[in-house]
Amino acid sequence: MNLSKISPMSAWQILIKPERIPYSIENLGSTISCFNNYDCYRKDFTFLNEQKSKICVSLFFPIKQNINNLDFENLKLNGPCIVYCHSQSGNRVEGNFLKEYCIENGFGLCLFDFNGCGKSEGEYVTLGWREQDDLSQLILILLKDYNVTSIGLWGRSMGAVTCLHYAKRNSMYIRAMVR
């Protein structure tokens, strides 16, 4: 890309309207997978953020019991969860590298697409400013609906900024943070 030919308007758009990297839901792995100590179940869901955009989420559950006898619809995590916050032009697939570590250590893993990224609705990112509100809403859902007992945040680039903004207002919910 020749930077000298970029107008101020298009430079602005590069920052807040990054190109979406397409992916298939299969890139997140199968719904049920096996690791050394645990099986893993992936539940996909959505929620509406403050801008009324649909945010897409994948929550991975470590399961140590017989997976065939579980009520997947009402499954609760009842334990700690790592929430991965992706980069500016990333999506939830970016956090897949954490799945094996989290599941084998009995942690849940939550991957989601920020507004304007991946499969979530919306056109723009705000480089962490409004994303902190999406993260806040997601964490409340995890605590209330999935009985998450503690939250660890892992952020990369824009996701790290989002984690810092969130932690400034909500440190009582965070047990660990990697940025």
Image (tube, helix red, strand yellow):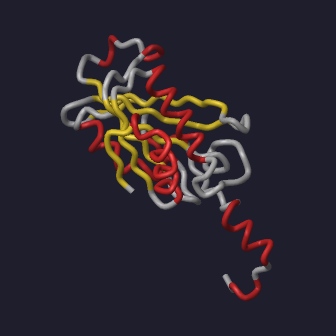
Q: How many marks?
A: 0
Seen as rendered, the residue at the extreme bottom is: 4
User: Which quarter of the image is occupied by the N terminus?
Assistant: bottom right
- Position of 56 with respect to 98 (left or right) is right
Seen as rendered, the residue at the extreme left is: 37
Choose between 141 and 35: the one closer to the eye. 141
Q: Residue at 41% of width from left, 17% of height from top?
A: 75
Q: Which percent across, then down, holds residue 8? A: 78, 77
Q: Quadrant of residue 5?
A: bottom right
Q: Which percent across, then down, holds residue 68? A: 33, 15
Q: Which percent across, then down, holds residue 149? A: 34, 26
Q: Quadrant of residue 113?
A: top right
- Position of 158 with respect to 40 (left or right) is right
Q: Residue at 31% of width from left, 19% of height from top?
A: 67
Q: Which percent across, then down, holds residue 129? A: 61, 52
Q: Residue at 44% of width from left, 53% of height from top?
A: 155
Q: Residue at 29% of width from left, 40% of height from top?
A: 102
Q: Compared to 158, does 114 lie above or below?
A: above
Q: Compared to 115, does 37 lie above or below?
A: above
User: Which quarter of the image is occupied by the C terminus?
Assistant: bottom left
